[in-house]
């Protein structure tokens, strides 16, 4: 008998992962594939972090930790907020989690009542709405575009708010667009949520990977804001599955109870490894890599525009270019499949990011070297006859 829970029918596949599977098949057949589809840095985890993990394992530090994470790691994260953002965040409000996805699971498990509505930007990271649906919340997409830098505004919140709206989730820098919210914009969104007695969650997992400025943390906009971050992107620890969450004080015990029951604790070796993430030697490595990402962005954006892709919001962070491909194709999903099969360039169609004109958009990740990006651009030029 096959009878899954009803929610499963509303959980869409992550199309980029399916494209990646096909790309791997083509590679196994001997094809040269340029990977610009998955949001994963191509750099290895910095050596000081890896050495710290090895030392922890060799030292027998492999037992369970506290459910909210190693006290010394929570203190290190609090120190990071003081040093980088000039914001005092007590370690007692910080939970170390199984990646940013684990943080979102705990947050929505804590906050989402069955049938409650939550506002999310469209386009946006697809897994957020599916995590919410898993906890019986209802995602309500807000279409955003170039007019608002692909970010929600207080006016858009007022337009889409209903009696069932329980909260708002935003991302800065955003996936797939790489756009940022200023601190004033975060404060304005927070003010609407406070007025409505609603929750406000801010995804900051691409912090550190910004290019013209340092993104402000929502922690500076109030202690009632849930802030989610990760060791995956800037710290380049994707497979280690480690993140953190800054929790409003009244909810800390609630999240702790959930963590005790749902995950016990994050990976112990990964937590000891992450203690080295904030060391000056590690930060120096990461900042050099940030400069490399900027070079890639500055190369790829004009290259794609010369082919006929249109970038309607210049990305200030993350490592994506979200391109309007309507002048080249009326179906971005078919285009992505065709590009993979015929050119060996793997990109992500807008279908993954929501229902706001997905057929007109395609995302390219500049998570490979400039030489490979140049090869990808040349293949695309030949494909489009440019």
Image (cartoon, rainbow, N blue to C red):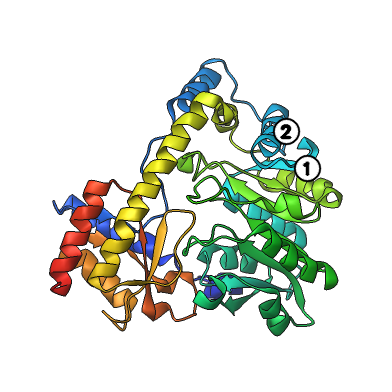
* Residue where numbered disc 1 is placed: 93
Secondary structure beneath dot 1 equals helix
20 is higher (above) or lower (below) than 256: below
Residue 223, horizontal then vertical, whole percent = 81, 51
Residue 296, horizontal then vertical, whole percent = 33, 50
* Residue where numbered disc 2 is placed: 66
Q: Decide if residue 69 is in sight here.
A: no
Q: Which mark is residue 68?
A: none
- Crowding around mark 2 (Cα neighbors within 10 Å: few <14, some 14 to 19, many 20+) is some
Closest to the camera, between mark 2 and mark 1, is 1
276 left or right of 246?
Answer: left
Residue 241, horizontal then vertical, whole percent = 53, 42
Identity of the residue drawn at 47% across and 53% down: 318
Q: Give the mark nearer the N terminus: 2 vs 1.
A: 2
Asked whether 89 or 345 is in front, the reply is 89
Identity of the residue drawn at 58% across and 71% down: 121
Q: Quadrant of the C terminus?
A: bottom left
Secondary structure beneath dot 2 equals loop
């Amino acid at each position: 008998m096959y009878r899954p829970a009803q929610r499963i029918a509303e959980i869409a596949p992550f199309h980029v992962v399916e494209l990646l599977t096909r790309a791997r098949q083509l590679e196994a057949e001997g094809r040269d594939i340029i990977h610009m589809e998955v949001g994963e840095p191509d750099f290895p985890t910095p050596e000081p972090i890896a050495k710290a993990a090895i030392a922890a394992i060799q030292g027998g530090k492999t037992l369970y930790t506290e459910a909210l994470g190693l006290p010394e790691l929570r203190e290190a994260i609090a120190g990071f907020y003081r040093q980088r953002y000039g914001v005092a965040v007590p370690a007692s409000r910080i939970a170390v989690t199984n990646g940013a996805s684990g943080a979102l699971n705990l947050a929505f498990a804590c906050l989402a009542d069955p049938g409650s509505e939550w506002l999310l930007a469209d386009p946006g990271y697809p897994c957020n709405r599916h995590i919410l649906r898993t906890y019986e919340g209802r995602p309500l997409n807000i279409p955003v575009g170039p007019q608002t830098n692909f970010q929600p505004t207080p006016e858009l919140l007022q337009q889409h708010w209903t009696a069932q709206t329980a909260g708002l989730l935003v991302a800065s820098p955003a996936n797939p667009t790489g756009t940022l919210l200023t601190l004033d914009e975060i404060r304005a969104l927070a003010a609407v949520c406070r007025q409505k007695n609603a929750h406000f969650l801010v995804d900051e997992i691409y912090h550190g990977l910004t290019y013209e400025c340092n993104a402000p943390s929502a922690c500076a906009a109030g202690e009632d804001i849930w802030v989610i971050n990760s060791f995956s992107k800037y710290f380049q620890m994707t497979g280690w599955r480690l993140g953190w969450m800054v929790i409003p004080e009244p909810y800390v015990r609630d999240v702790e109870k959930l963590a005790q029951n749902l995950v016990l604790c994050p990976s112990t070796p990964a937590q000891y490894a992450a203690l080295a993430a904030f060391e000056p030697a590690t930060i120096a490595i990461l900042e050099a890599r940030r400069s490399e990402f900027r070079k890639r962005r500055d190369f790829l954006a004009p290259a794609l525009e010369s082919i006929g892709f249109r970038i309607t919001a210049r990305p200030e962070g993350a490592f994506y270019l979200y391109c309007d491909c309507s002048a080249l194709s009326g179906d971005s999903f078919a285009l992505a499949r065709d590009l993979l099969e015929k050119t060996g360039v793997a990109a992500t169609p807008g279908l993954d990011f929501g229902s706001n004109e997905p057929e007109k958009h395609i995302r390219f990740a500049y998570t490979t070297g400039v030489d490979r990006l140049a090869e990808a651009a040349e293949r695309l030029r030949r494909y489009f006859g440019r």
